Amino acid sequence: MAALLELKNVKKIYDMGRDIHVEALRGVSFSIEEGSYTAIMGHSGSGKSTLLQIMGCLDRVTSGEIVIKGTAVKDMNDFQLAKFRNRTIGFVFQSFNLIGNLTATENVELPMIYAGVPRVERRKRAMELLKLVGLEEPEERAYHRPNQLSGGQQQRVAIARALANDPAVILADEPTGNLATNQWRRILDIFKRLNESGKTIIIVTHDPLVGQEATRIITLEDGEIIKDERIK
């Protein structure tokens, strides 16, 4: 499989003031293959959240290079980066990050609005995606706001939103962290089905039960890769 995402000797140093510098990533290099399912694991403070920010183009490297779909993102300005991110990367967060005054359907439509998708087309696609993740009107409240949905339902809406612009990769940051066992099992099943359909999935987690769902586990410690194993 071709490399979809490549990190080349990536370093990230945070300036904390008073000549205090924190080296969150220390020369990290690896590639993610198209259609793969990868878990990034490590204890709190290992650098995995910083790595997700870098891979998701939400933060910039101090040195090194990141290439996504053959495009080096280091020299993009903020506007170019935001446009590229919206069309290329789908995000799923532990806290769902849904807009509280928008319905489930409107939350899914939001990335398509930024991408300039016509209203009729985005509404149709939003409903299709909500059905894909098992949440649709009237049984599953597609027109209800986040506070009217359970945690599991909110996370399914978040996954549908992440898929809105058919991104090249889904980045999920502790996507089951706020869910009960019966809910997070369903979320992991959705990721598995998406991967089986060809979608590239990267999950950042500290939970071994979540990590073992992937076919590759990259383990970080103190900003460095200490293990990179394929498990299936």
Image: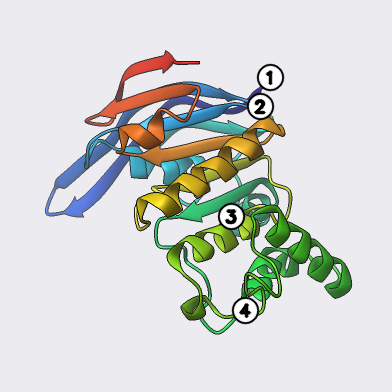
**Residue assigned mark 2:** 34
Q: Are marks 2 and 3 in contact (CB under 8 Å)?
A: no
**Residue assigned mark 4:** 103
Amino acid tagged 2:
Glu
Amino acid tagged 1:
Ala
Compute the Cα span from label 3 to label 4.
Answer: 15 Å
- Residue 103 appears at what percent x and percent y? 62, 79
Dot 4: element: loop
- Residue 153 appears at what percent x and percent y? 53, 64
Asked if residue 10 is positioned above or below residue 83 in the image, the reply reads above
Amino acid tagged 4:
Thr
Left or right: 105 in relation to 232: right
- In the rendered structure, find residue 2 and report the number of the disc placed on it: 1
Q: Are marks 2 and 1 in contact (CB under 8 Å)?
A: yes
Left or right: 71 in relation to 6: right
Dot 3: element: helix
Q: Say if residue 175 shows up in the picture.
A: no
Image point (58%, 36%), residue name: 192
Q: Nearer the viewer, mark 4 or mark 1?
A: 4
Q: Are marks 4 and 1 in contact (CB under 8 Å)?
A: no
